[in-house]
Image (cartoon, rainbow, N blue to C red):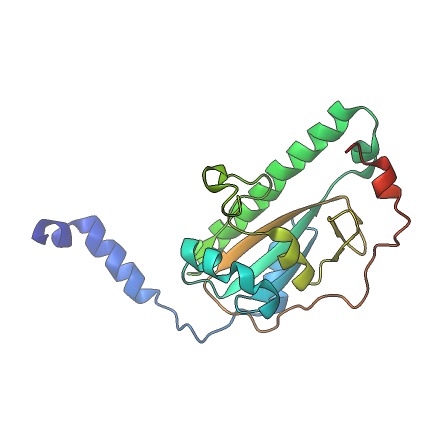
Amino acid sequence: MAKFDNHLTVKWWREQSTNNLKTSTVALNSDSLRTLCLDAGADDVGFVEIYRPAIADQHAEILAVFPPTKTLISFICCMNRENVRNPARSIANLKFHANYDYAYEVARNLVKAFAQIGVQALNPSVAFPMKMDRYPDKKAWVISHKPVAVEAGLGHIGIHRNVIHPKFGNFITLGTVLIDTEVTEYAHPIDYNPCIEYKLCVAACPV
């Protein structure tokens, strides 16, 4: 252990950690944080505190993968409408997959930016559930992005079970980043549901 403690890299890292130690009571400015997220490529963003009652069923799972979580950053990346609407499924599928990759890159860039200011952050999977080894006994995802997005004021879930954004509609990809810091102002669900219940989505759905 003595050799480890005396290693130059270990000494340097511990000095940096001490010098950069932040007080947990300091909250990030929500306006500045929003600008940071939009600059990283998100099209809209909202912030939710970890102990929001509406996401209580996710508390244990989130804290298991990232114990210091205090805030969930929910963001969306919009898609090209006509690509998604196109009857040529190769065009629509390509857009979906490209947008998933883009949203993950946005989350990745945010985590890198947070590291530079001493904020711990984690970006789980953006799109497809990956924890299939525990399905069906437990959920196959770490974070259920939809209820977090609703609580972040990014829309409501329509009758087709997708989140509808008040500006971008269904043409969005959802992402969530966890941080170990509180923010000065949290979002809340919007006061109306953009779903107009014409059931066109149901009629168009291939399943």
- Residue at figure coordinates x 60%, y 36% from the top left: 101
Q: In this view, does 71 lie to the left or right of 46?
A: left
Q: Where is residue 168 in the image (x, y as percent from the top left)?
A: 79, 49
Residue farthest along the left direction in this orientation: 2
Q: Based on the displayed image, in which of its 4 quarters is residue 33 positioned?
A: bottom right
Residue 193 appears left or right of 148: right
Residue 5: image quadrant is: bottom left
Q: Which residue lies furthest to the right in this view?
A: 198
Q: How many labels does the image show?
A: 0
Q: Quadrant of residue 120?
A: bottom left
Q: Whole-percent x and y of residue 164?
A: 77, 52
- Depth check, front residue: 96 or 14: 96
Q: Identify the residue at horizontal 48%, vertical 57% (top origin).
A: 62
Residue 48 is at least partly visible in this image: yes
| Front residue of this view, candidates 144 and 106 | 144
Vertical position of residue 65 compared to residue 94: above or below: below
